[in-house]
Image: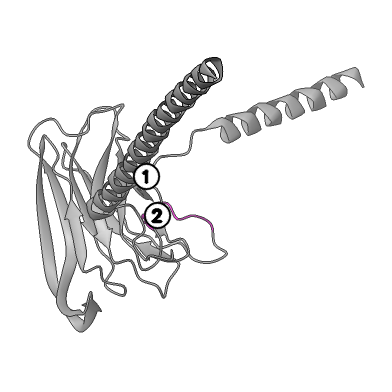
Amino acid sequence: MKASRLGATAAVAATAVTTVVVLSSPAFAHVSVQPEGAAAKGGYAVVDFKVPNERDDASTTKLEVAFPTDHPLASAMPEPMAGWKIQVTKAKLAKPIEMHGEKISEAVSKITWTATGKGVEPGYFQKFPVSVGALPEDTDELVFKAIQTYSDKEVVRWIEVQEDGAEEPENPAPVLALSAASEDHHGSTTAEDASDDSKATEKTAATTTASADSSDTTARVLGVVGIVVGALGVAYGVLAGRRRTNA
């Protein structure tokens, strides 16, 4: 009886240990995309493609990101990065899109980063920034399929699209979630916006300074007038006193 209980207890303990091991196993990281700030529909944003190195004996030396063709982006400008050669590939659009009153007949179809040095070494990750826009207004997300190449020639394809109600695929494609459209349709702050804000601030400061100078000048004038009036009052009092004495 006791032996049976001990056996059952051992089995439960073994099951518990196995469960803990499974639950505590780290989930494999994958290539992902996140905006710096907001990625609002109809606006512009800077997005980072985050690339972790999942290998202990090889570096990531190449990243290829395919841009969506169902919702093409007329503008996609990668940020220069030391140690990486960047190639932007464009393709003709089946249906031209309009941006700022102009018809755009081609859009970025792919951006490729190729390491000129060590790349992303084991134990590290790197972000690959891209300024994109205008973001579409008729979808809640954009799917970017990515291909990661290692120094040992291994290729990992992050191209599987998440299906509704299904478990996350083994190699999911990076997905950019879009937020509600902002009133100004500019999304992230641009250099032009920052310049306008700076000019407005300078104008406000100048107005405030001018107002303060005007108030200070008025106060000084009133002060001088008060002194003059006071002096006249004293003089009048002295003269009146002398007249009384003479009388």
85 over 173 or under it: above or below: above
Using residue 51 as the reference point, say whether residue 240 is left or right of it: right
Query: Image quadrant of residue 146?
Result: bottom left
Q: Residue at x 31, y 26 (%)?
A: 123
List the residue tagged with mark 2. 172
Report x, y in % for residue 154.
21, 43
Say what amino acid the circle numbered 1 marks.
His
Say above or below: 67 vs 205.
below
Q: Is 168 a magenta residue?
A: yes
Q: Given the current orientation, which residue lies at the most extreme bottom position?
A: 95
Label at residue 229: none
The residue that disc 1 covers is 30
Q: Quadrant of residue 61?
A: top left
Location of residue 74 in the rendering, given as x and y in whole percent from the top left corner: 21, 69
Along the line of sight, the residue nearer the viewer: 203 or 175: 203
| Dot 1 or dot 2, earlier in sequence | 1
Tell me, yes or no, whether the two marked residues, 1 and 2, touch with CB atoms within 8 Å. Answer: yes
Whether residue 190 can be seen here:
no
Residue occupying image coordinates x 12% and y 35%:
82
At label 2, the amino acid type is: Pro
Q: Is residue 101 left or right of residue 213?
A: left
Residue in front for this viewpoint, 149 or 8: 149
Give the residues drawn in magenta, as a range: 167-175
